[in-house]
Image (cartoon, rainbow, N blue to C red):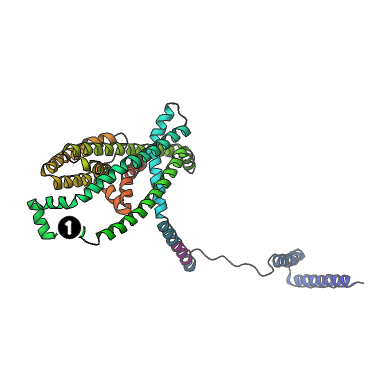
Amino acid sequence: MSDHEQEDTVQARTGSDVGDDLVQAADAAGVEVTDVEAVVESLFDTAATDETVDAANPFGVPGRPVSRSSAFYRGFVGALGVLAALALGMALKEIGSVITLVVVSAFLAVGLNPIVELMIRHGVRRRWAVAIVAVSGLVAFALILVVLVGAVRDQVSNFVDDVPHLIDDLRGHKSIRHLDEKYHLLTNLQAKLESPNLVDKLFGGVFEFGVSGLGALLNAVIIYVMTVYFLAALPQLKRSMYSLVPASRRERVGRLGDEILHRVGGYVIGAALVALLAGTLSYILLWCVGLGHYALPLALFVAVLDLVPLVGSVTGAGVVCLVALATSLNAGIACVLFYLIYEPLEGYVIYPRVMRSSVDVPEIVTIIAVLVGGALAGIVGALLALPIAAAVLLLVREVWVRRQDAA
């Protein structure tokens, strides 16, 4: 007989002996034999189950997972969340300039989209409409560089040369002379202009200005390329963004999004028209009061500042009036009277009429939005503050207020 057969015989005898012993013990205790057989079968089943578990877990049965309500788990996960937030904040700080370029490009693309949509309604395909807008913008920028830069350079040079004479003229006014005697503003300015190190400072300033100008030109090229891309891909981008919303709400979200984009586009075009009007009227005014040699740079200055809501137009008007007063008392009085009439007219008649069809924002919200935007992101924040405020008000009226009314 082989070794395996002997082991099976021993196991069988051992099992039968155990069974006989259990039967005898059951008879003595008055327990039925069937119950004893069930106990024996359960013993053998338990042994088989233990062997299976041991085979599936050769290194032991895994313990219970860490409780999510334990202090260690909460502290560890919370620390990971804080570290992730810090890393995200540092990353956003490092790429802040890139985010600014992207936001400005998207803002310009949304502002130019109504022009593209207008050409599409007249039968022009979108790619050709985008190409026309892009080429027109490039041609306008080239004309500004070729035609206006030379004139601005000459007029700014003349203005710098006339600064000492302007200082002397300012001293001729009693009030300004009194302020200069108290705070020495004009004296310090004249001392800096007469400094022997002025040439070295100017060369250094010219170099720094050239580097800054090169960086500004590079940023302008990047903004131009991204604006054209956003303008061409705007329908696809909108569909991609709306597809992230649940299907049951996609139609309403799409309508709200289109309305926000429409308002932003209307704001950009309206602001550009108002700034163009302010610059043109300032140019005509300066020629009429005998300041034609300063007209172009000051008119451009007024037009650019007029793009900034609330404070831009007042700042530009103040600079023009100061230069006019330094040149001639009559010219200064004429400029002050003109802007005293034009600024309220622009603020309460022209600007509201232009913006009424696109942006509906109360005056106090406009002031707060511009101040907050300027404090957070400078000129870019001030420019974007009003359309962002208009979008937030639209969402509040159409989502939050409607829910409160239905509650």
Q: What residue do we see at 13% from left, 41% from top? A: 331
Q: Which picture quadrant has residue 39?
A: bottom right
User: Is residue 383 rendered magenta in the image?
Assistant: no
State which quadrant residue 401 falls in.
top left
Q: Residue furthest top?
A: 122
Q: Where is residue 395 in the image (x, y as percent from the top left)?
A: 36, 42
Residue at the spot 46% in from the left edge and 67% down from the top edge:
75
177 to 313, vertically: above or below? below
**Position above or below: 154 against 135:** below
Find disc 1 in the rendering and name its residue. Answer: 190
> The magenta stretch spans which residues?
75-84
In this orientation, does residue 194 appear? yes
- The answer, for residue 404, to whether it is visible in the render is no
Q: In which quarter of the image is the C terminus?
A: top left
Quadrant (top left, top right, bottom left, bottom right) of the N terminus:
bottom right
Position of residue 404 in the picture relative to residue 91 (left or right): left
Q: Answer with the quarter of the image where residue 149 lies.
A: top left
Q: Does the magenta stretch include residue 79?
A: yes
Q: Is residue 88 left or right of residue 23?
A: left
Give percent across and percent down for residue 76.
48, 66
Give the residue at x 42% y 37%. Answer: 134
The image position of residue 91, as x and y in percent, is 44, 58
> What's the residue type where badge 1 is placed?
Gln
Residue 393, how many percent across, how many down? 32, 42
Q: Give the main secondary structure, helix, strand or loop, of the magenta stretch.
A: helix
Q: Is mark 1 on a helix, strand or loop?
A: helix
Q: Is residue 281 left or right of residue 71?
A: left
Q: Nearer the viewer, residue 159 or 75?
A: 159
Query: Which class describes the residues within 10 Å of circle 1: few (<14), some (14-19), or many (20+)?
Result: some
- Total number of numbered discs in the rendering: 1
